[in-house]
Image (cartoon, rainbow, N blue to C red):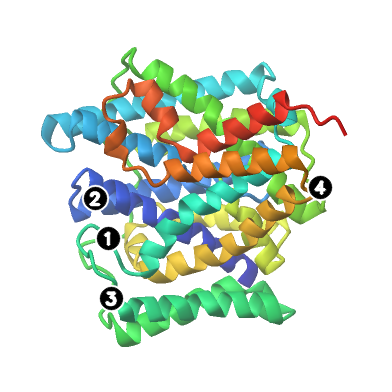
Amino acid sequence: MFTVIQWFIFLLANAVAIPIVIGSIFHMDPNELMLLMQRTFLIIGLACFLQGWLGHKLPIIDGPAGLWVSTFAVFAASIGVTGSEGVQALRLLEAAMILTGVFLIILGVFKVSGKVIYLFTPLVTGVFLTLLTFQLSGTFLEGMLGLDQNTPYIQVNELIIAMISFSTVLILSSFFKGWMKSYAVLIGISIGWILFGLFIDSDQSTPSNAPIFQAPEIFAWGTPIFDWSVVPIALLTAFILLSNIVAALSATSNVIKGDPYLSHTQMNRGSFVLGVNHGISGVFSGVAVVPLASTAGFIQLTGQKRKSPFMWASAILVIVSFFPVIISSLAMIPAPVANAALLATFVQLMGLGLRNLFIEPLNERRTTIITVSLLLGAGLMFIPPESFALLPETVKQIISNGLLVGTVIAVILDRLWIDEN
């Protein structure tokens, strides 16, 4: 039972942050934000359950894709965020997610997805996982510091509590055994939540205006607007997301089975179901999801390798999505605490990345590929998004994504530079 609860809490930690980010970008009011969070819960719960049942069949959390968050931000900047312009941008994004889903389904059905596996050697996977931790660690640290658009200064009290949660998870998972290690994330979040309620926000009561029961709305932003301009974006995004699938599956397989191997069939099924999940995301007007490689860090941290608790947690999240009054309560997990728990799982994830990078001795070839990929990929992450505003839309999607650029560079160099030893 506690294992199911811990998976459920980890699902929540991955679900609550992105709706808040999207809501702030498009200036959504509190009710719109709550409904977006409701639909996000449904999308994530369905996506995880379908992947575990019909897709890759591993206990891997699907969460809002960072690539789609940046796409939402680009559409907001180029079209607008308020009035009819904001609605148009969101309806175009619905269409883009559905089209991306169609392409992913086609890639899975025609078994194209499985053919990208050979590109992801341990070196390339190590570069991807290391860049992923670089990309998201800043976001988690901002959350721990209490920073957002309305709070530009570090909140010391929130940081102290976040560090207590972070340290609790790491200490329990590193120096304890048995149930203390298994439920490290749950214990860390619980302690942080209690401390937050005692010392920072004592009024954490459930909002009274949230309805008890309400089904998630279909096409909440309006019917999709299909435009030829979104076709290249959707196709490019579909291929980019294949790298996420490979990295998530290989990292999780490595933790669960001690072997990063994944089959072509597993990859093709994962791509097919990811396409279905993108369609669900578009229909229910949320941010499209992708298998999260950070799940491997969570599993290694807690030792929870069984799939059945994960499936139960996913099903419970679907059920909870029909009860906004419960969502309003669960969404009150303090952001600094949730981000601290997520950052703790990334400690293990970065360890996996480094082990992949150094699984073989460093020679001139491996050293050059690793350093060039990491330098260029990480460097792009520090360039403001508005710097790419004048580039064509498709080029912008590629060059502004440091994770993608660094991984592609690693793939190209790894293929072209043949090791003569």
**130 left or right, relative to 137:** right
| Farthest-out residue, left | 83
Look at the image and tell me in which quarter the N terminus lies: bottom right
Categorize mark 1 by other alpha carbons within 10 Å: few (<14), some (14-19), many (20+): few
Return the residue at label 1. 148
Q: Earlier in the sequence, mark 3 or mark 1?
A: 1
> Does residue 193 appear anywhere in the picture?
no
Would you say 253 lies left or right of 332 here?
right
* Label placed on residue 205: 3
Amino acid at circle 3: Ser
Element marked by disc 1: loop
Q: Badge 4: how crowded within 10 Å, few (<14), some, or many (20+)?
A: few
**Residue labelled with disc 4:** 360
**Callout 3: few (<14), some (14-19), or many (20+) C-alpha neighbours within 10 Å?**
few
Q: Nearer the viewer, residue 92 or 165?
A: 165
* Sooner in the amino-acid sequence: mark 1 or mark 4: 1
Depth-wise, is mark 4 or mark 3 nearer the camera? 4
Q: Amino acid under label 2? A: Ser
Residue 19 visible in the picture: yes
Q: Quadrant of residue 4?
A: bottom right
Residue 222 image-quadrant placement: top left
* Residue at x 64% of width, y 27% of height: 412
> Marks 2 and 3: CB-CB under 8 Å?
no
**Looking at numbered disc 4 in the image, what kind of residue is underneath it?**
Glu
Which disc number belongs to residue 331? none
Depth check: 412 or 308 in front?
412
Q: Earlier in the sequence, mark 2 or mark 3?
A: 2
- Of helix, strand and loop, which one carries label 3? loop
CA–CA distance in space, label 1 to label 2: 10 Å
| Quarter the C terminus occupies | top right
Q: Secondary structure at mark 4?
A: loop
